[in-house]
Image: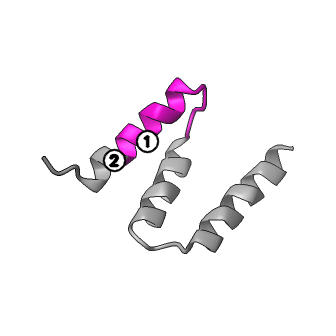
Amino acid sequence: MEITRDQAIKNAVASAEMEGLHPTEKDIARIRDFVEKKLTHEEFVSLILADVKEVS
């Protein structure tokens, strides 16, 4: 049985939620963009770090 990208993302989000994290829709959209190679790893990490700096 092959898992689709959407199912893989849903599984990852569910796993994060079990660890006490709560990804937003914006987070999930960024994850999808990264998985679909619309963002490089560096861009993805930079966006996350920018969000963390805003919250701090």
Q: Residue at x 60, y 65 (%)?
A: 44
Direction front: furthest residue: 1
Direction left: furthest residue: 1
Under mark 1, the amino acid is Ala
Number of other residues with Cα within 10 Å of mark 2, as a class: few under 14, some 14 to 19, many 20 or more: few
Q: Which residue is mark 2?
A: 8
- The residue range painted magenta reads 9-23
Under mark 2, the amino acid is Ala
Judged by its main secondary structure, the magenta piece is helix
Q: Disc 1, disc 2: CB below 8 Å?
A: yes
Give percent across and percent down for residue 50: 76, 59
Out of 7 and 26, give the one closest to the viewer.
7
Q: Is residue 37 left or right of residue 4?
A: right
Image mark for residue 12: 1
Image mark for residue 43: none
Q: Is residue 44 left or right of residue 29?
A: right
Give percent across and percent down for residue 48: 68, 56
Q: Residue at x 52, y 72 (%)?
A: 39
Q: Residue at x 42, y 58 (%)?
A: 32
* Residue 40, above or below 44: below
Number of other residues with Cα within 10 Å of mark 1, as a class: few under 14, some 14 to 19, many 20 or more: some
Say which quadrant the C terminus sits in: top right
Q: Residue at x 64, y 72 (%)?
A: 42
Q: How is the structure coloured here?
A: one colour
Give percent across and percent down for residue 54: 81, 51
Give percent across and percent down for residue 14: 43, 32
